[in-house]
Image: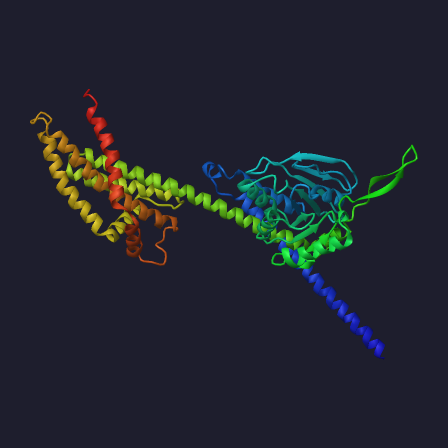
Amino acid sequence: MTDSISDTGKSLDQELDEAISGFDQIQTELNYRQAQATLRELVENLDLTAQERSGLESEIHGLETMLEKLDRLVVQIAAFGMVGRGKSSLLNALLGQQIFETGAIHGVTRSQQSANWSIESEAIAGSDQEILRVTLPSVNRSQIELIDTPGIDEVQGEAREALARQAAQQADLLLFIVSGDITKVEFQALSELRNFGKPMILVFNKIDQYPDADRMSIYQKIRDERVKELLSPDEIVMAAASPMVARAVKRPDGRMSAQMIRLDPQVQDLKLKILEVLHREGKSLVALNSMLFADQINDRLLQRKLDIREQTANRTIWNGVMTKAIATAVNPVMVLDLISSAAIDVAMIMSLSKLYGISMTQQGAIKLLQRIAIAMGGITASELLANLGLSSLKSLLGLSAPATGGLSLAPYLSVAVTQGAVAGVSTYAIGQIAKVYLANDASWGAESPKAVVTKILSSLDEDSILNRIKDELRAKLDLSARQPAK
């Protein structure tokens, strides 16, 4: 009776474990498909102009590559290490074939039934070094791709950072190969790679070159001292990718000599550790890494878009500033000064609205200008007084120029430049305020229009803006003044 109850309990526990396992597999599959759909939508709906795409080709290609990786169920394993640590030999030992060569970047694909390899090249941003890719399809349609990177001491500074970032961001599992106690350069590189948050295995390679006692001493020092803050003991394995042993060989003359004989690779522990990680995390790992990579790239694309829009908006504003300054300076009729100034401000606001994808009619631009003018208060009043006073004086000097033989022309230009500069400053302020409003999806945000306007105005350096307008205005007016009358 007890045995029957015990068997029933085991059966229920087994069924429960299988049910939980089945649910986990369904959830994993759903997460994978969600990541796939999200990435595809991002790739297919990149809202970028030709100017915004310029300089981001590698990032966009990275997104497309990541989507292809998801579609093909590829798990990427990238290997890092210094020159001479046996990195390429270790990958060859895992493959069972001599595929990897030092310093090459190739994409190599082998079908399940064939040992034929096709090779294709790939560039790395920020480095003239190369890496080698090998793709191995498995029985369930998923693939494992091994990536061999240049030695971390072959490239320096920004180039090394770009290489590590590109390879590590796309990979799902990182291998870091050493062949003895860790150097300062290796520890720094290991720390940088750890920051990517990817599963990592530290491989102590070439253990065949050390006596047993020395080998264990180095292993324990690495485990307990060198990388204690970075890796757990479970993330460290030992291997011998290309072990050699000395054998006594009888020479033709009858004498004995030592000859180095190559033995089978000792990489079984590493294979088991890789399989353990992939079996435990597999699809979830690929989906998560794809989303993290896509999120980082999307942030860069968005920032690039915002930067270009900011630059274009500032050029639009400055064009409006100089258009208004020139129009105000050369126009001798006071009433026309005020009318043309408003028209220029409205045109500038409509140009900015198009840039930020906000649908706005001329009437809408006028209403926004009115709201900004009310919130600006003192600046628009100052501009109005300056325009009224300076326009009267400018008109008088302009009319008296023929009677004075042109002697009043110099004072006229001085007054015109000042009046134009004052008008330009107000347009600059209006443009910056409109830009913030439009960039915030035609909203003032949580603050009132007055608070937003006050904050922007307090950040503007009126004197430098005024002087810049005057300098450009003098250059334009002086040039036109020197041109002979036709």
Quarter-of-image position of residue 95:
top right
Could you tell me if residue 4 is visible in this image?
Answer: yes
**At which x and y percent is residue 58?**
55, 39
Residue 233 left/right relative to 418: right
**At which x and y percent is residue 32?**
63, 53
For the C terminus, which image quadrant?
top left
Judging from the image, the colouring scheme is rainbow
In the foreground, 186 or 167: 186
Tell me which residue sits at (70%, 65%) in the image: 20
In the foreground, 12 or 121: 121
Tell me which residue sits at (66%, 59%) in the image: 224
Quarter-of-image position of residue 6:
bottom right
In the foreground, 117 or 383: 117
Q: How many marks?
A: 0
**At which x and y percent is residue 203?**
70, 50
Quarter-of-image position of residue 320:
top left
Q: Residue furthest left?
A: 403
Tell me which residue sits at (84%, 40%) in the image: 258
For the N terminus, which image quadrant?
bottom right
In the foreground, 34 or 318: 318
Could you tell me if residue 59 is visible in this image?
Answer: no
Q: Residue furthest bottom?
A: 1
Q: Residue furthest top?
A: 486
**At which x and y percent is residue 245?**
82, 44
Tell me which residue sits at (25%, 51%) in the image: 376
